[in-house]
Amino acid sequence: MSPIPHPELEAWRAEFPILQTRTYLNSCSLGALSRRSMGYLGEYQALWNTMGASAWYELWMGRIGELRGRVAEMWDARENEVALSPSVSGALSSIASSLDYGARPKVVVAELDFPTLVYQWLARHDVEVVRVPSDDGIGVPPERWAEYVDERTAVVATSHVFYGTGYVQDLAPIAKAARDAGALFVVDGYQAVGQIPVRPRAEDCDVYVGGPLKWLLGGPGLAFLWVREERIAELRPSIASWFGARDQFEFRTDLLEFRDDAGRFSMGTPAVPTVYTALGGLEIFREAGQERIYERIRALTADLVGRVEEAGMEMKIADEAHRSGIVMIRHDDAAGAVRRLAERNLVVDHRAGFVRVSPHFYNTAEENQRFVAALREV
Ligand SMILES: Cc1ncc(COP(=O)(O)O)c(C=O)c1O
């Protein structure tokens, strides 16, 4: 097996206590908790204890603004294009509520997308959802999108990385199909952010959603929403919260005027503990370096794939050009295997007949080796 690049990043292992007691290969479900985030969480608790509600105005609102700024920086975006939402579902709901489907009743998604993305439009009676099929159950040929998108299409919505296969979609041809038809291009990047360097504007997206839970090491409770500045004014949500109102602290009940920036898509009081833990995760992501993280994830994935092949086990895996840090290994009793691996201190996951393994930059080839050996035994 070839050496894994950027061995200097292994110094970060000491930052994640779980790596000292477990072989942790499940970052696509939940990134590991860092000492940095624990420190932030301690600060949040101390402020709550000592300041009570005054922490809101004096400090917590500042931290919320800081997090938006950090997300903007990570995505090479403007701060007014970024909003916080309680979940990816919440962020997508707000966007889905902002369109008029009268003249354009069609929304095009991929059959491999995460259900919550598709549900935004299946939940509506005024929308016809069209699913772009996959031939191999792994990815969707990029040129296929244009066949499904037309002048009746309001939205093209799909994943940057498919959660069930790790397949990385080429966004440019999908963006072009959407753009040519005059449709909004919405990307669920939850499985991309934190492993793949993401630039939503350069990738020609209109809306991009991610969050701290998984590869960004920031825990559950928030999502990050980016909306292209030029599209914000035309998107008027029909679900709302006071955080999205222009004059939030005037407490008006006679009138709702939305904020001019992406904050109009905010859905109420954000989870402040997650604001703090997410700041820790984003700092580590920035310090370790987006490019280096991705190179290491790709190498660890190649190493894992090689070992699984050598062990003669079957996988559902994208070709190298479209591969990311999610490896699916077929197993007759995937749930049972994951349980038995957990008994041996190995943490992985399962989805529909497959054991799902997701190495992050803090993992090592030795951990891959330990996992494959244990999987053979269970
Ligand atoms: C690609 C993708 N989108 C969305 C979700 C769910 O997001 P949320 O629970 O924040 O609505 C997941 C969850 O694992 C996911 O993998």
Image: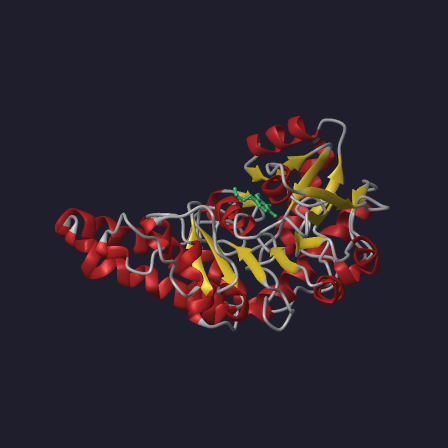
Residue shown at 59% from the left, 60% from the top: 195
Question: Can residue 373 be seen from the camera position used here?
Answer: yes
- Residue 262: percent from the left, percent from the top? 44, 62
Which residue is painted at 85% across and 45% down in the image? 136
- List x then y, in percent, for residue 45: 23, 48
| Residue at the spot 68% in from the left edge and 47% down from the top edge | 105
Residue 374, image quadrant: top right
The color scheme shown is secondary structure
Left or right position of 227 against 83: right
Horizontally, is 231 left or right of 63 in the view? right
From the viewer's side, name the closer residue of 201 and 365: 201
Count numbered badges in the picture: 0
Looking at the rendered image, the quarter that the N terminus falls into is bottom right
Q: Nearer the viewer, residue 376 or 270?
A: 270
Tell whether 25 sits left or right of 315: left
Q: Is residue 290 left or right of residue 82?
A: right
Give the vertical position of 356 relative to 203 (above or below): above
Q: Quadrant of residue 62?
A: bottom left
Above or below, comparing residue 375 to residue 158 in the picture: above
Q: Nearer the viewer, residue 363 or 52?
A: 52
The picture places residue 112, in percent across and down from the top left corner, at 73, 44
